[in-house]
Image (tube, rainbow, N blue to C red):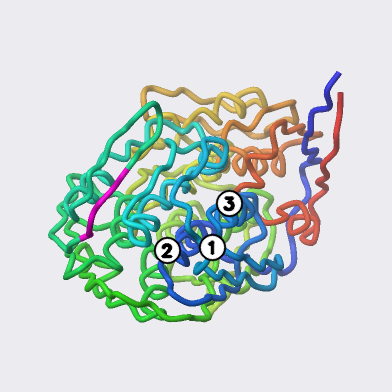
Amino acid sequence: MPTKERMLITGGNPLEGEVRVSGGKNTAVAVIPATLLCDEPCTIENLPDIADVHALVDILRALGAKVDYVPNMFMTVDPRPAEGWQVSYRDSQRLRASYYLLGALLGRRQQAEVYLPGGCAIGSRPIDQHLKGFAALGAEVEQLGGRIVARAPELIGSDVFFDVVTVGGTINVMLAAAKARGTTIIYNAAKEPHIVDLANFLNSMGAKIKGAGTDVIRIRGMQYLHKANYAVIPDQIETGTLMIAAAATHGDVVINGCIPTHMEALSAKLLEMGVRVTDSDDAIRVRSNGVHRAVNIKTQVYPGFPTDLQQPMSALLTTAKGTSIVQETIYESRLKHLDEIRRMGAQVRVMDRTAIIEGVTDLYGAPITATDLRAGAALVVAGLMAKGVTEIYEPHYIDRGYEHIEDKLRSLGAVISREKGE
């Protein structure tokens, strides 16, 4: 019989100590494709050692780029030999952010072919706004047999009006517009920290981008982009997951190397629950030794409560005193993790995109299965809280976005391991 990997957690141990957060996953998967726009080699530091980064290394090499990658050290990309413009089905399926190769390759080669992306099954994530943006820049875009083909004799700057706020669409149009002729203005742009970081990276290569972090971004296309050395920002979602885990275990944890202002929506909710949260320039301390109060959560685009933290947070709420209501407004299938946590004793009712959570005194270890990246993080939080041993199957989802999560949690006192089993 084939072996099946699982993560084992013995719950009930308060997390205590200090931990350093890794580089941002959401930034990394945008910045790495952006290196294709450069006309000289680029070096990126502080990249997380995660599956999505490894997938992008393979994709860049398949396109012909020369990549020198030393995990936890640096990645140097020389895009000059890259003549390819097609990403294979297998590579496209390895990560959701493979669609950023569309914008990067359009900017580089004026043509791109990428299959509809893989990643996590958290609901419909249409890319119609991305394609609308490419069309506004003069590209002809077709969807053929599960793949997207985009071509443009020349990309020309234009006004792009998004019907809805889209992080992926904002990034993709930024990538394509960075080398378009003329000026592109994106209206109703997303404001997430990793969009600001991508703009800073492109600007470090000589791009002319203003307004990132607001809802109007102006990009003046540049014919030539020079080499740059750049360090990506810390991971906002890993920071939040560690904050939630500290609270869930009634621990006392200092998270170093983070950006506290990126965490204000989460910090406010934890404070509302009765958790103590304090911060300094680049560190956050989370302490909790009492009963948590129920709170209501509604996911929103930045600077609202992030959808990527809804799942770990709703795991924490399963033992909060009272009734919590969680509304998921971004992805319609992002409450499936609660079906698994219900097996551990949680009292949850899900109606469409809303979860009603009645706090229980304890969760109990059980065999459960991760269905996506952040669901996996939520199950880890539940396992850390639970009495007994929790077995998490399909932990490879967690590896897509969290760097060596077991090592970090073990350093804080968690009893967690991974093994192959029949």
CB within 8 Å, label 3 to label 1? no
Residue shown at 52% from the left, 61% from the top? 28
Which of the two labelled residues, at mark 2 and mark 1, occupies the earlier sequence position?
A: 1
Looking at the rendered structure, the kind of residue marked 2 is: His
Q: Quadrant of the N terminus?
A: top right
Picture disc at residue 194: 2
Residue shown at 50% from the left, 46% from the top? 293
Assign the magenta stretch its main secondary structure: loop
Residue 341: tell me if it is visible. Answer: yes
- Magenta residues span 150-155
User: Alpha-carbon distance for marks 3 and 1?
Assistant: 24 Å
Q: Is residue 327 magenta?
A: no
Picture disc at residue 24: 1
Q: Which residue is mark 3?
A: 62
Residue 403 against residue 419 in the figure, above or below: below
The quadrant in which residue 240 appears is: bottom right
Residue shown at 55% from the left, 70% from the top? 78
